[in-house]
Amino acid sequence: MTIQVEDVSKAFAGKSVLSHFNLEIASDTCYAVVGEKGSGKTTLCRLLLGLERPDSGRIRLLGDYKYAGVNAGAVFEEDRLFENMTAVENAALISKRLSEKIAAEELSKLLPKERLTVPVSDLTEAERRLVCIVRATLVPSDVLVFDEPFTGLTKEQRKSALDYVLSVKGTPPLVITSETYEGLSFAKKVDIHEGIALQQV
Amino acid sequence: MNEKTELAIGILCFGAGCIAAATSGVIGALLAGLAGCLLGGGLGFLLFSAIEGSGHVTEGTKKALFVLLAIPVLVMVLFIHLGAALPVSLFVSGILTEGILLSNGLLCGYLSADRKMLEMAQVFRMPGENVLRYLVLPSAKNALERRIPLGFLVSFALGLAGCAGVFSLTLCVSLLLAAFGAGLLAAFFVSHLFGKALS
């Protein structure tokens, strides 16, 4: 399956956020959307996730795809966790097919076991991001969209999180937004500036 | 409108209903009529202030709720004139009134649920029962916790006011219910015009 972002524009309250943006997202490929704050990265993610509609242009799902919208695994810019629940509960409740045992096994690959059973409100910022990253990979998806997933992570945590994601993601494409390209050289770089894709390497 | 004001209105309605119920004859009926007005006013004002305050409900929804609010009055008039037993008419109108209060609480609860969490649930295709259990019901519970005690007070007062009217004269009951309806209507317009400023 290929996701084609074709000449997409989006504005909020009259302010253009994305302007005639084009991108083709192919299976088994990783993309690093790199740009400063306010460049339109989050809007692009929201459009890909079907949470916003483009003002003009379109996002097409090409190939043999039977669903109306894309099935995505996502890391949002904010954590979006149930604060009074544990990491395991947060990860397990997103799907009927997920048991707490499976969720705990996966989470323990990135987090210490003793941190899995405390409410996420007691976790550090980095630990919460790791919970979000694992949660995003636990449901079968056609695309993974990670919006600034490494905020607050140390270099080691960032590397282990990336290794984990690449080892479990399978063939779906991975779209990661970041302010820097550092550590993302495995991914195709898409520079974005004020809502315009400058180049696709 | 803050909780203290809501509670004050509820107690006022409850007190008026009690006085009406405790008084017999024409005075009772007149007081019941007054209680009806206060009840209608209080209930209508509360509901529409809550709706205005939520900022999410459309004009169409307000009109639909207004129609729903008028039902207990119509049902009571209809039932009493058809000669139905008082408990039946009170039960039906009470259920309807409570239903509206509860659905208002649920609606406000759903609308006040965290939008970002609902988006997360949508993206992950979270099972409906989990969305209901972990997102909608907790916020509905918060809304209901604020509305239910007042709902009981208002319904109880409505019942007492209705009893007082029926014990007096059927005509007076109709008067009471008409006054209730008029109060509700007036409250709707007052709340509609000034609800946002007062809430």
Image: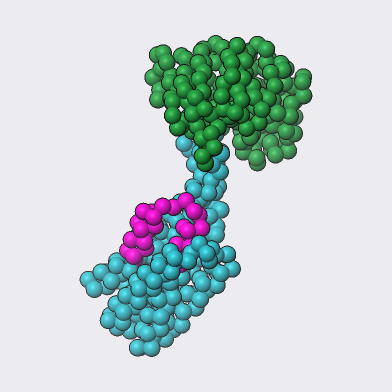
Chain colours: A green, B cyan
Say which residue appears at 52% left-offset and 18% top-offset.
A23
Count of picture labels: 0
Say which residue appears at 63% left-offset and 34% top-offset.
A78
Provide residue A82's location: percent of width, then percent of height.
62, 38
Determine if the magenta segment contains residue A117.
no
Say which residue appears at 47% left-offset and 23% top-offset.
A7
A20 over B86 or under it: above or below:
above
Q: Left or right: where does residue B175 sit relative to residue B139?
A: left
Provide residue B128's location: percent of width, then percent of height.
46, 36
Q: Quadrant of residue B65?
A: bottom left
Quick one: B147 or A192, which is closer to the camera?
A: A192
Q: Left or right: where does residue B147 sit relative to residue A38?
A: left
* Residue A45 visible somewhere in the drawing: no
Say which residue appears at 42% left-offset and 78% top-offset.
B35
> Which region is colored magenta?
B44-72
Determine if the magenta segment contains residue B54.
yes
Quadrant of the snapshot with the N terminus of chain B: bottom right
Provide residue B86's location: percent of width, then percent of height.
32, 72
B55 over A8 or under it: above or below:
below
Q: Left or right: where does residue A110 sit relative to residue B35?
A: right
Quick one: A20 or B31, which is closer to the camera?
A: A20
Residue at the extreme left: B82
Magenta stretch: dominant SS? Answer: helix
* Residue A67 visible somewhere in the drawing: yes
Provide residue B96's location: percent of width, then percent of height.
37, 61
Q: Left or right: where does residue A172 sit relative to residue B88?
A: right
Q: Quadrant of residue B99?
A: bottom left
